[in-house]
Amino acid sequence: MNPMDLHITRIETVIPTAIMPGLVLVRVHTDAGIVGCGESYYTPHAVAAMIHDWMARRLFDRAVPFSVEGTWRFLYERAANFGTQGCELRALSAIDLALWDIMGQLTGQPIWALLGGPVRDRVPVYNSSGGPSYGARRDGHTDPQGWPGYGDVGEKGPLNDYWSIVNQPVEYAGELIASGTKALKTWIFDFAAHKPNGGLHISHADIETGLKPLRAIRERWGKSIEIILDGHGFFQLPAALRIARALREIDPLWLEDVIRPDCIDTISDFRNKAGVPVAVSEMMVGHEDYRLVLEKRAADYIMIDPTWVGGISQTRRVAQMAQAYNLPVTMHDCTGPLTLLAGVQIAAATPNVAWQETVRAHLQFVYPRLIDERLAIVEGHIALPRRPGLGAGLLPELFSPKQPDYRESRAPAPGAAKAG
């Protein structure tokens, strides 16, 4: 079927509250029987409302031929009238993933083939030290979703890597090394930011507490595994610089969001003084943000979340922009299986993507409850998807009208009056 003749007939969203309450899942149906899947994370009800109440009108317009880029530009430019960096951009991200998924299925190709073909045969990953409940349903909590950057260390248990990095760092790092994983990320200093002074000050005692597990890994395993520190944007400049100076002895792969990301000039100042590589960051969710980061030399790595920044379309543009500055890109995921797959698709076809983030607990315990493919890490890498489209589909049973957070929009019948 010619893509110019393809039309969208139905859009479904659902929030899998019992699995990942911050996630919104999207299915876009076509008159060819092809179903494209997408997702985004945070404020899922607002994202779903943006899709159904505002974006669906464009997707259902039968006078508009099916077009990934044309749809992206139209929705982005219309949203620019009132702001593009909130739920509007996350909704557009989810739609963009679904449209790329449709195009891949329609042509019988994985998305990386449509992006120009492979530049590698597998993508290196690092493991973020979360656990099965990181971002997922937190049983027994009055707020099952939690707040960004406020994950619990929790208790000892299968693949609770947050607990392990704090309490058994040598054993934990040894497991990753044995599996072939070459790097780990930790947010070992978050506890200090959660104290009454927040990110304004970090004491020498707190520095020593945060360094203890990292020193133990270096003493036992040397440089056989890379260490990344994520600060979740908690710290202001003086505290961030104290952390950076302390981390020099660890020789981290990068520091990420140790400083609050709301002033790019200060991030540039931090990078100039830190003495270690700096990654900036999935918290930058606009093309202009990344342009300023690049022009002000505020980063050594550019990190992107495909379902926050504007989907596969915008992620590829940002990655190529970073390439012009000879900066590597790393793909973010602590949020959902299609975010991970989108990152892998882009990494497969984009030369300057250096790493893909993963959470091994999510891969084993959470993502199989959402998609119809098992995603595996082998020798520290994830294979290029071979299935047409994104490489997996959302489980159909998740999209039931019986679910309290399910919504559906249907295209008007041909000849019906358009919505105003």
Image: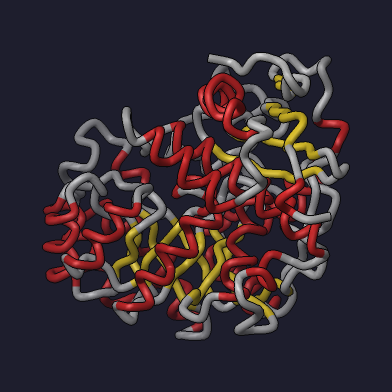
Residue 114 in the figure: left or right of residue 357: right
The quarter of the displayed image where residue 404 is located: top right
Residue 91 vertical position relative to residue 241 in the rendered view, above or below: above
Residue 328 image offset from top left, x and y in percent: 40, 76
Q: In the depicted view, which residue is nearer to us: 58 or 353?
A: 58
Count of numbered badges drawn on the protein:
0
The quarter of the displayed image where residue 278 is located: bottom left
Residue 191 image offset from top left, x and y in percent: 36, 43
Please give the name of the residue rendered at 76% of the width and 54% of the height, measured from the top-left corner. Answer: 364
Q: In the depicted view, which residue is nearer to us: 108 or 126?
A: 108
Residue 240 image offset from top left, x and y in percent: 20, 56
Residue 89 in the figure: left or right of residue 338: left
Let me know if residue 156 appears in the view. Answer: no
Let me know if residue 39 appears in the view. Answer: yes
Please give the name of the residue rendered at 59% of the width and 42% of the height, measured from the top-left corner. Answer: 94
Residue furthest front as drawn = 415
